[in-house]
Image (tube, rainbow, N blue to C red):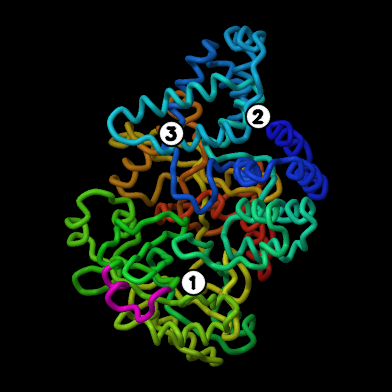
Amino acid sequence: MLVELCEQLEATKKRLVMAYLASTFLKQLKPEEVEPAVSMLLGRAFPKWDQRDLEVSWATISGILERLTSADWSVFRDAFSATGDVGSAVKALFESSKVRKQATLFGQKPLTILEVRETLEAIAEVSGQGSREKKERLLDALLGAAGPLEVKYLVKILIGEMRTGFHEGLVELTVAKAFNIPVGLVQHATMLTGDVAEVASIARTRGAEGLRELGFHLFKPIRPMLAQTAKDVQEALSELGGEAALEYKLDGARIQIHKSDAEVRIFSRRLTDVTDSLPEITEQIQNEVKTNQAILEGEVIAVGENGNPMLFQHLMRRFRRVHDIDEMTKEIPVKLYLFDVIYIDGKSLASTLYMDRRKRLGEIAGRIPLTEQIITRSPSEAENFLREAMRKGHEGLMAKKLDSPYTPGIRGKRWLKIKPTLEPLDLVIVAAEYGYGRRHDWLSDYYLAAKDEKTGKFLPVGKTFKGLTDEEIINVTQQLKKLTIRDEHRRVTVIPKIVVEVAYNEIQKSPKYECGMALRFARITRVRDDKTPEEADSIQKVQEIYRKQFEKKANY
């Protein structure tokens, strides 16, 4: 059973053992079970590229659990306090329930992978009047048919937080072992498709040959190529071989654009379809891009009356808006800058050198501007370019290796980002407290955490009440209430879903937190609706920044 495998994975931290256990399991599955199984092992209801959303809140889930068990909810709270894991707390709740024990005596049949997927699909596809009640009935039936161990992992899938330590890199190794395919080929296929669960399914049915035939598919978004950080232009030029393409790093939202003739779809950094929120960008692509088919990358920024960039939070209002779009386009106009092209008329350009891709992009972009760029090996010229970018209201620079290929989903050293201030961290809110005075009704004091790459656990590194506007605090409060797992007086513990960008003065030692570190003078600079918790910074990165602080001064 899938849940038994999850228990085994949770019980070990040894990579090879996890890969062996999972590969043995995958080999026993029917072809149609492989993709759903791998998606669920990663805490996903559907494949990564799938745009469907369950739209089921924790409040709904917890209400159903209370009805099903008729148990004392303090059992859940105590178990959660002991383990910090929602699934384990739900399992304890079911095990304590007399109602559930009686149901178990009548011999429940184990749920199958396909039964669970079919129910999740039914939940996601419910819409229209009475949709909430229909979703609850489907969810009630699913959880009601589950035993304690099954419900533990069903809830983890529903909230998207598996925490077994079985990440995508290990799945690639697992697929390679299960179907006797070189791991490099599996990794390349995952880069192209953006979804290791889909790769596992193809490997099961068509083997290595099927993976070799894979390419980009229009309207199926791929993971974007990522950048590491350089402390200054000198380090960036040195890292990239002495010469690099430097481009403005815009304070906007990265988008991926798919075009096939007149049809255009736009995807966010999180691979969410945001086409309907950006009608003017869709029209611009249709009118200007001089090719039948293309996958393009660009940055959208909000602009003021003077043409200068507006704050990032204004742009996020556009991305969240699904109604009254025409009104919002007038209130918050946006501008598109293109910076890469990775597919044209049936041909992948992923292995094409960066400068050749940039040249090709310029040939098909029409009147759509490309990001401002210079190619240089001069540190002084690079510094002047950085100052110019900052003067115009941008974040800094991107430095790109001239001969770099496009590597989807990979955070390598071929692209580097340069910011003139101490690099902010993208952290996840794991708890919050109500404020005081006029903020007494708002969750305005936030506990900020980074994810441990080894355990999957979110470790707090600080707390702050600074940075957000009243409007943003109200919006975050509404979201946090839907994610609340435990409510104690004026403090709530929440499912880690909301990512925020955090500025700070330094990282210092602190016995207060489990990780042994704390951010000094932390303040939130923006809510990162465009990032998932998986994309937030890790505790290992926080540790590295902490170490680098003391390269030129004593460590006290």
Type of the residue with mark 3:
Val
Q: Is residue 277 left or right of residue 540?
A: left
As measured in the structure, the alpha-carbon distance from the residue carrying label 1 to the one carrying label 2 is 39 Å
Type of the residue with mark 2:
Thr
Crowding near the residue tagged with mark 3, few <14, some 14–19, many ≥20 C-alpha atoms within 10 Å:
some
Q: Which residue is mark 1?
A: 419
Q: Which residue is mark 3?
A: 56
Type of the residue with mark 1:
Lys
Q: Reply above or below: 284 against 357.
A: above
Cβ–Cβ below 8 Å for labels 2 and 3? no
As measured in the structure, the alpha-carbon distance from the residue carrying label 3 to the one carrying label 1 is 38 Å
Q: Residue at x 34, y 30 (%)?
A: 131
Q: Is residue 511 left or right of residue 63?
A: right
What secondary structure is found at the residue carrying circle 3? loop
Q: Reply above or below: 233 against 218.
A: below
Q: Which residue is mark 2?
A: 83
Sooner in the amino-acid sequence: mark 1 or mark 2: 2
Specify whether residue 512 is in view: no
Q: Which residues are magenta?
A: 283-293
User: Quarter of the image holding residue 112?
Assistant: top right
Comparing labels 3 and 1, the label whose residue is closer to the camera: 3
